[in-house]
Each structure stands twice: as structure tokens, then as C-alpha cells.
Amino acid sequence: MPGPTVAIFGVNPSVAGATVNDQTIRKDLGFGRALGWGKIIKGNKFAFVATDIDRLGMAADPIGPGNDAHIEQIMRDADLHIFAWGAMGKLPRRLRTRWRVMMEIANKVGCKPLCFGTARDGHPLHTSRIAYSAPLVPWSAPL
């Protein structure tokens, strides 16, 4: 399908996969249709799979081996890079600075992160929580 390859980065994978979508993936696909994207690649700050964010905090290694390399490759493979992990307050305190690594990787690759707006804490809104009419804007890391 013609159109840009778009990487959307969230918090952690859900149980969605190659044959089953969840609310977030359905919403990401909706954005893709509305905005004429050719391909969506989903990436996540953490590799640990859980539908409950508290379980992410209890995981011994929520980032997972090799996740940073996968994130970097996703960024290299995409034309547009959308950060969409939501407000940091929902994460366990020890995991709230992981966004800094995402920015380091983006800077290394030369990506210019975009988002569909920001939460009160300055972090990019989660795609499942916004209207399809929300504009894509550049995202700057909060100070």
C-alpha cells in the first residue's frame, strides 16, 4: 500500500498479535487509514507483555534483552515516528525515566518524534485516548 511507514511507540505490548488486535492496535490502524499511512510498525518502551500496568512494574526485566536494538531498527525502518505512551504517572516510579532512552535512540538515528498532543506532564498522549481529528505535532521531551 502506498504511503509512509509509520512507527508508533507505546508503553508495553499487549496480548494483540498477528491474528488478534486490541483497542490500541485498532485505533492505530484507524489513524493509518485516516492519514494514508502505508504501513504501521508498533514498538514499545518495554518488551514485557501484560495488560495490567502493575504487572509491568513487578517484572524482573521489563525492558527485555535486545529491546533497545529493536527500537532502533524500528526507527530506522520508519518514515514517521510517533510517541504515544501516555502520562508517566501510570507507570511504577522506577520505570518513569525510560522515555529518556527512547530520546537517546531517536537522537542517534536522527528521528524527529511526533505525537497527537501531550498529557499534563508533557508526555505524548496514548493513541487509544484521542480523536482521529487530533493533529500530529512535534514532540519535545519535558524538562
Image: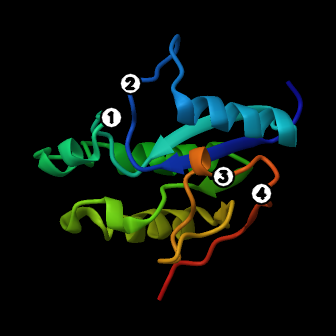
Q: Nearer the viewer, residue 98 or 24?
A: 24
Q: Which residue is mark 3?
A: 130
> What numbered label is drawn on residue 134?
4
Q: How far from the left and from the top, in percent, is residue 102?
A: 45, 62
The relative height of residue 48 versus residue 9 in the rendered view (above or below) is above
> What numbered label is drawn on residue 51?
1
Tell me the SS state at disc 4: loop
Q: How far from the left and from the top, in percent, is residue 60?
A: 10, 46
> What type is the residue that disc 2 sits on?
Val
Q: Residues within 10 Å of mark 4 (few under 14, many from 20)?
A: few
Tell me the SS state at disc 1: loop
Q: Nearer the viewer, residue 133 or 96?
A: 133
What distance separates the C-alpha of mark 1 from that of mark 3?
20 Å
What distance separates the C-alpha of mark 4 from that of mark 2?
26 Å
Q: Which residue is mark 2?
A: 15
Q: Confirm or deny contact between disc 4 and disc 1 (CB under 8 A).
A: no
Q: Residues within 10 Å of mark 1 (few under 14, many from 20)?
A: few
Q: Confirm or deny contact between disc 1 and disc 2 (CB under 8 A).
A: yes
Q: In the rendered picture of this protein, how many numbered marks are placed on residues?
A: 4
In terms of sequence position, does the residue under pointer 4 or pointer 2 come before the other? 2
